[in-house]
Amino acid sequence: AQSVTQLDSQVPVFEEAPVELRCNYSSSVSVYLFWYVQYPNQGLQLLLKYLSGSTLVKGINGFEAEFNKSQTSFHLRKPSVHISDTAEYFCAVGGGATNKLIFGTGTLLAVQP
Amino acid sequence: DTAVSQTPKYLVTQMGNDKSIKCEQNLGHDTMYWYKQDSKKFLKIMFSYNNKELIINETVPNRFSPKSPDKAHLNLHINSLELGDSAVYFCASAVGGPPDTQYFGPGTRLTVL
């Protein structure tokens, strides 16, 4: 069985500060990990994904994430956030025969001026 | 051109009614999905079709019936709507099996009164 835990439901941060959104996973099959972003009243947009290879993955909008197999984590980072980064961020694990995504509960990144 | 589109965007209806939500993708993908996002933003897979064949059917009341007339369309019909069906429903599509990225539609906000 697969599961995803996002420990922080909300992360407030000031503009231009660095941020880390935490994600831990469990899986008994090959792991594919994703971060999606959901802006208010919109659908989900892929930020980045880890399939294999380099454990540091770079995505859109200056975000990056690091896959850590020993700690079963896939934390999302950005060195300097903008007001426009305010959104809900979802970590997800995929894989298995049907490729269904198991989502975490989401983290609201609230960037303040 | 919108890659994954859903109609309607908003749906307000009374308990006991039957309603449908339509999804279309113009990406040429073989696999389509329905997800439900509840009021706490939790996202959960409901169904998936691959080339018009049902491959994922999670624990969903049988009042919900997906229909895929062709691989570019996946519609969701809901009978005898209940208050608890109020949610945002997202359609997604992917090229095929894991680890293909899923592309999400803008969502349909269903409100049952």
Image: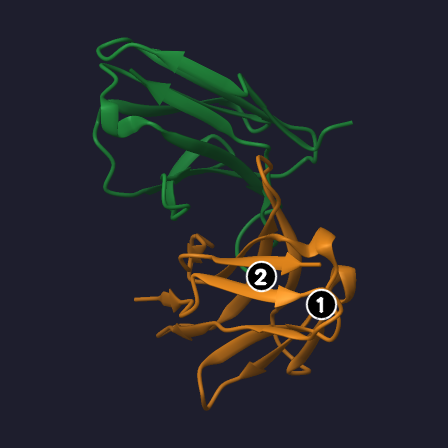
Going by the picture, which residue comes out furthest to the front? A113
Circle 2 is placed at which residue position?
A35
Circle 2 — which element? strand
What crowding class fits label 2: few (fewer than 14 Cα within 10 Å), some (14-19), or many (20 or more)? many
Q: Visible in this render: residue A93?
A: no
Going by the picture, which residue comes out furthest to the bottom? A70
- B53 or A50, nearer to the observer: A50
Q: How far apart are marks 2 and 1 (CA)?
A: 10 Å
Image-based side of A79 in relation to B67, left or right: right
Circle 1 is placed at which residue position?
A63
Q: Give, as a three-letter code, the residue at label 1.
A: Phe
Q: In this view, does B112 lie above or below A65?
A: above
Colour that chain A carries in the picture: orange
Q: Which residue is painted at 29% across and 15% down in the image?
A: B113
Q: Visible in this render: residue A104?
A: yes
Q: Give, as a three-letter code, the residue at label 2.
A: Trp
Circle 1 — which element? loop
Indicate the chain on which mark 2 is placed: A
Which chain can be seen in green? B
Say which quarter of the image contains residue B53.
Answer: top left
Residue A27's tag is: none
